[in-house]
Image: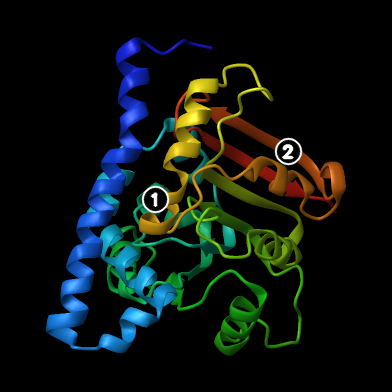
Amino acid sequence: MTEPTVKEFASFAVVPAYFISLAVYQWILTLLDVVFIRRDLRLLLDVPKLKSYAFGRFWNKYGDFMSADMPPETTRLLSTVRGTILDVGPGTGDQLCHFDSAKITRAYGVEPTTNLHEKLRFNAKKAGLGEKYTVLGAGAEPESLIPALAKEGVLADGAGEGIFDEIVVVRCLCHMPKPRESLDTMYRLLKPGGRLVTHEHVCNPWGKEIGGSFMSLVLQYLYVYPWEFFINCRLNQDTRKMLFNTGGRDGSGWSEIHLEHLLPWSTLPTLVGYLIKKT
């Protein structure tokens, strides 16, 4: 594993602060919009809705920039996605350009932040997915996802299991209010032998894996509260453990697990790979 230079380490140490500052700016614009343009003061009391609206503004503005330099491990993996897929939390669809549209039969993009939908549909069309890609205004929680799929006719036969060949989860588990329940639902919807493909930023693996950094772990805990409030995301979530235990403890729900940490020394390490559901 290549050790980071001092410049690289210092850069990643301050990157979260930079993103938080951008999010704060969008929050200010959101509040001004609510008070002076929409004139809906009641919305100020609905913090979850306000956070969703502010995040939508943030991602519409900076999503392209934050997605421009995805690691090759991720882009190669996304290019192999095939069949009928569930694309969970696609945001504005910045990753759809990495899909091979010829390999995809049908795709359902589940995105709860409705002010991202217009750009998501545009990017789906731009990626050559066109009418293959259906945008659903829902979250990944069972009480939201299942009715949305049923309304679309995906569950027309009453089936609630084994529907999708592949489920794609890119940078969204950290946003979910109920990640464990959402993963359990995804597992049920995945066909036996199907893949769950993921790219998530996670807690620094210091003390658990070679290459982790105590300093970066401390910095994550310093950033965690403003990051969660303004960017609506958990910076230090142990996503690997959640994925590993989905479908059964100790990885028993999966026939294969291929996950690796990228930049494990940084404040924004990522977990990339896939898991195959047992047949």
- Image x and y of residue 271, in percent: 56, 37
Between residue 146 and residue 10, name the one nearer to us.
10
Identify the disc placed on residue 156: none
Kindly identify the residue that appears in the image at 35 percent across and 74 percent down.
Answer: 50
Identify the disc placed on residue 257: 2
- Image x and y of residue 214, in percent: 55, 21
Between residue 29 and residue 114, name the one nearer to us.
29
Between residue 149 and residue 206, name the one nearer to us.
206
- The quadrant of the image that shows the C terminus is bottom right
Count of numbered badges drawn on the protein: 2
The image quadrant of residue 27 is bottom left
The image quadrant of residue 112 is bottom left
Estimate the spatial distance between the alpha carbons at disc 1 and disc 2, rounded to whole Å.
33 Å
Kindly identify the residue that appears in the image at 18 percent across and 81 percent down.
Answer: 35
Q: Which residue is mark 1?
A: 226
* Left or right: 255 as drawn, with respect to 48: right
Amino acid at pointer 2: Ile
Residue 202's place in the image compared with 219, above or below, is below
Residue 154 visible in the current orientation: no
Mark 2 neighbour density, 10 Å: few (under 14) some (14–19) many (20 or more): some
* Left or right: 136 as drawn, with respect to 125: right
Tag in front: 1 or 2: 1
Residue 43's place in the image compared with 103, above or below, is below
- Image x and y of residue 194, in percent: 71, 54
Secondary structure of the residue carrying numbered label 2:
strand
Residue 241's place in the image compared with 174, above or below, is above
Kindly identify the residue that appears in the image at 78 percent across and 48 percent down.
Answer: 245
Q: How is the image coloured?
A: rainbow
Kindly identify the residue that appears in the image at 77 percent across and 39 percent down.
Answer: 256
Amino acid at pointer 1: Pro
Of the two numbered discs 1 and 2 on the same chain, state the one appearing first in sequence.
Answer: 1
Secondary structure of the residue carrying numbered label 1:
helix
